[in-house]
Amino acid sequence: MARHLNRVTGTPPTLADVAELAGVSRQTVSNALNNPSLLRHDTLARVQSAVDELGYSPNRAARNLRTRASHLIGLRFPPAQEGTANALMDRFVHSLVETSKEAGYHVLLFAGDGGDPLAGYDDLVRSTAVDAFVVTDTYLGNPQTAWLEERGAPFVAFGRPWDNGDATHPWVDVDGSVGGRMATDHLLDRGHTRIAWIGWRKDSFIGEDRRSGWAGALHDRGLSTKGLASRVEDTLSSGREAAAVLLDEAQPSAFVCASDTLAMGVYRTLADRGLEAGRDIAVVGFDDSQVAQVVHPSLTSVRQPLEQVAVEVVAALSGLLNHPPVAHPRTMLAPTLVVRQSS
Amino acid sequence: MARHLNRVTGTPPTLADVAELAGVSRQTVSNALNNPSLLRHDTLARVQSAVDELGYSPNRAARNLRTRASHLIGLRFPPAQEGTANALMDRFVHSLVETSKEAGYHVLLFAGDGGDPLAGYDDLVRSTAVDAFVVTDTYLGNPQTAWLEERGAPFVAFGRPWDNGDATHPWVDVDGSVGGRMATDHLLDRGHTRIAWIGWRKDSFIGEDRRSGWAGALHDRGLSTKGLASRVEDTLSSGREAAAVLLDEAQPSAFVCASDTLAMGVYRTLADRGLEAGRDIAVVGFDDSQVAQVVHPSLTSVRQPLEQVAVEVVAALSGLLNHPPVAHPRTMLAPTLVVRQSS
DNA sequence: CGTCCTGCTTGGATCGATCAAGGAGCGAAG
DNA sequence: CTTCGCTCCTTGATCGATCCAAGCAGGACG
């Protein structure tokens, strides 16, 4: 295949080259690409074939300069947290890339050093390197969103503005409460009545959200939650200890956990006592991580519709960038329950 | 904080604005940013403070257009393969983003539909959207690398050009053979003499590479590999079946697996027979996935130095982009063995 | 006094696309 | 026959930074 370089200058073909070959002006070529309806059919065809012949593709930098847009979406790749939910991020990013592509955007990753959550954003905003951001780490306070709003930088958040009811920016989130309820209802339907909760510390908005689903499901059936809940760090050993205490003091027949990691802690405690998940005690996790599928017995888990989240995020972004005056959408999606052996 | 917009036009400050505020010419501001050594200390300081006051950051599009560089590195985010080593990718991408940042680059993600591995590359090359690529999926034949070389597009591969000895492009890879050897030596040192291998099908270059380390280690101690190897698909059930057959026919006391997934399959078979990894039979996996850490008993696994790979990749890219005529580096890194309960 | 050197200015062109006007050409209407 | 209007296309300016070529002021040096 030809390398499609201008024979004289050795550089990629430009719009002017196409225009010359097609025997039209630059502007006509530009219109052929951006407003084909303005051209007569035969000229359009002529330009098209010139484009094909030269293998022309508009120079991004030039277009960006003139249109004041980069067609890039900035995404801060959160600091790696070995052992927790980064596979989650992977699924989301993947879908985001795919969906953005359909909307004509690419995803630009940038790093933020752990300390300052604003690091990285500032530079990209000022150098007009991206058109908008996707903000994912809104879980505990969110200086980014306030800062971005103040700057007038377009963005969509994956995650509710938990601590700021007046926030007006668009966001997409998954209803953790519904997830907790689905898990609990599932266990109730199987006949369990003493269902314990192992979740995160009280200052975790997400943890409390998920927990509320568990509590709500129990209350709806007239069951008490008293003594059946534990709130700990999101680690294997914390889950293990919490499970041991709960088994001793409350004799639950099932556990719902705020994460698969905690659920794996429960597995350990069960193993310590010669019990097995699914056979002796039911266990449900959260996030449907890879571990849930591979472990034995495989773990029932609440799965977030991350692919759908990405789709909604991009939809919101497109709205934001194309028609500024539309209302800012807030989208809440429901998770699903993936039932496996552990329940 | 001020929004740093020009009061008259409402647009971000330009180089001309800075020049006016500092009382110097545009050229001098440009020099202050790109060739500070040309300026006297006091003028440099004056320009700097004007830059700070306005919150100026050079417009990326304009700079890109003029310098014919985007300071972006393209990375194709490989199709999601639920259940396998995508967490691996996560670690790599993360380090790549961090390291690129230090070198003054950002990472642009793009999608390739599963079918055509070239999809996405072409468009980015022609529109000069990225300065270079990082190619990661070279495991089985690699049309991308040949295609990119032909186009003269700069890139660095993570992965050797297995099927093409004459390839001259720079690459970085991890020595799977060393990994297999480390795992096997570790088991030999613990007194095991019948060590089985469960790997991938023979047409997997990576699988054969890893396997060669296992075979080499055994041969070096005068031990035979006969009847101790199995080559299957990279799935849990394949590993499970392979382990069952091997246990029956070869009575190994230890397993080395080409992936953690296969190792989990071994765990299943052990559980089926009332055996436990680490206590009755030793097991070593590959890739040090999240599962290896969480499962019980925790799994000894060969860990790839992905952070270091990213550093080397970026180093090679910098060399490529700054001093074209240097020799193309080929860097081979050694993995490490993370010893846990299963051995 | 003339020359070199440092440090900065001036004016312009340039990268490659798009934007905003400004024509040709042609049919219909006056 | 002119004039308007419409379609289709062209021309020149523009986005903001960088590159280039001169040139100029002032100090050091012979």
Image: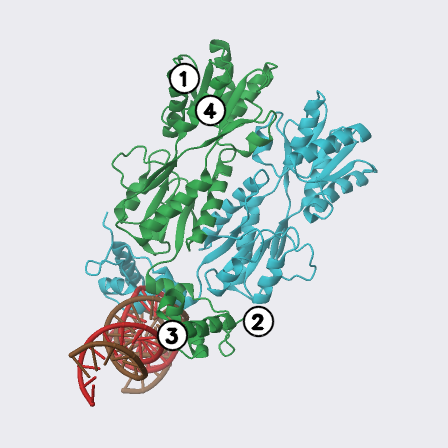
Chain colours: A green, B cyan, C brown, D red
User: Which callout, 4 or 2, points to the residue nearer the camera?
Assistant: 4
Lower position in the chain sequence, tag 1 or tag 3: 3
Q: CA distance from mark 3 to mark 2?
A: 24 Å
First along the sequence among labels 3 and 2: 2
**Residue bearing mark 3:** A26
Counting residues from the N terminus, which is met first, the one under dot 4 or under dot 2? 2
Question: Any mark on residue A218, and which?
Answer: 1
Q: Dividing the picture into quarters, in which one does residue B283 lie?
A: top right
Helix, strand or loop at mark 1: helix
> Are dots 3 and 2 on a single chain?
yes
Q: Residue at x 46, y 16 (%)?
A: A195
Give percent across and percent down for residue B138.
62, 53
Please give the residue where the numbered disc 2 appears in the rendered image: A2
B221 lies left or right of B205: right
Residue type indicated by callout 2: Ala
State which tag comes first along the sequence, 3 or 4. 3
As drawn, the label of residue A331 is none
Q: Amino acid at mark 4?
A: Ala
Q: CA distance from mark 3 to mark 4?
A: 61 Å
Q: Secondary structure at mark 4?
A: helix
Q: Is residue B300 visible?
A: yes
Measured along the vertical axis of the image, is residue A297 above or below residue B80? above
Mark 4 surroundings: few (<14), some (14-19) or many (≥20) residues within 10 A = many
Let me know if marks 3 and 4 both belong to one chain. yes
Q: Measure the alpha-carbon separation of dots 2 and 1.
A: 68 Å
Please name the amino acid that badge 1 sits on. Leu
